[in-house]
Image: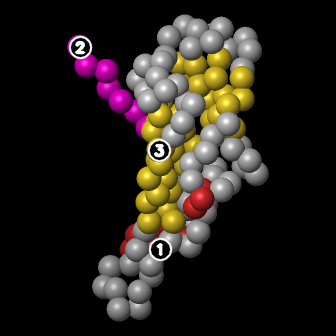
Amino acid sequence: MDFVDAFLGYAVGGRSSIKFLKTTDGGLNWIEKAIVLGAVLNTPILNCVEFIDANVGWIGGEGQHLNHSGYIGKTTDGGETWLSITMYRPIDNQDSVNTEHETDNITDVQRGIRSIYFQRCK
């Protein structure tokens, strides 16, 4: 959940279907907005949301396939449309010398982008 000001806020979540919610009254009422991120992300799991103003924001989520480690999406129109980038982790290779990252990911059931934060500078 992220609030741009005292009234405008966004929230994400969902396991079997994605949820992107927007409030303009400080959280008293929420509107569910449709989100389309591309063919690879037909049922993404959203983990986080961060908006820097009323229009520009990012969402992060989990991977859906063996080597798909997550994605990040960006909007410049308050969540009406999104551009997304899918991130892939290396496929485990028997010839690989360093597979430590693969071992860590095996026990990590919440893969992907979990947090997005921007420091506002003056």
Tell me if label 1 and label 3 are in contact, CB under 8 Å.
Answer: no
Kind of residue at disc 3: Leu
Please check the rendered image and state whether residue 74 is part of the magenta-colored stretch, yes or no: no
On the image, numbered disc 3 is attached to which residue? 83
Q: Residue at x 45, y 39 (%)?
A: 74
The N terminus is located in which quarter? Answer: top right
CA neighbours of label 3 inside 10 A, class few (<14), some (14 to 19), many (20+): few
Can residue 120 be seen? yes
Give the label, 1 or 3, closer to the camera. Answer: 3
Q: Position of residue 44 (x, y in %)?
A: 63, 52
Q: Position of residue 5 (x, y in %)?
A: 50, 11
Image: 93 above or below 9: below
Q: Earlier in the sequence, mark 2 or mark 3?
A: 3
Give the label, 2 or 1, closer to the camera. Answer: 2
Identify the magenta region: 113-122
User: Can you tell which mark lies on residue 122?
Assistant: 2
On the image, numbered disc 1 is attached to which residue? 103
CA neighbours of label 2 inside 10 A, class few (<14), some (14 to 19), many (20+): few
| Closer-to-camera residue (22/118) | 22
Q: How is the image coloured?
A: secondary structure
What is the spatial separation of the Cα atoms under label 2 and label 3, in whole angstroms? 28 Å
What is the spatial separation of the Cα atoms under label 2 and label 1, in whole angstroms? 42 Å
Please check the rendered image and state whether residue 118 is part of the magenta-colored stretch, yes or no: yes
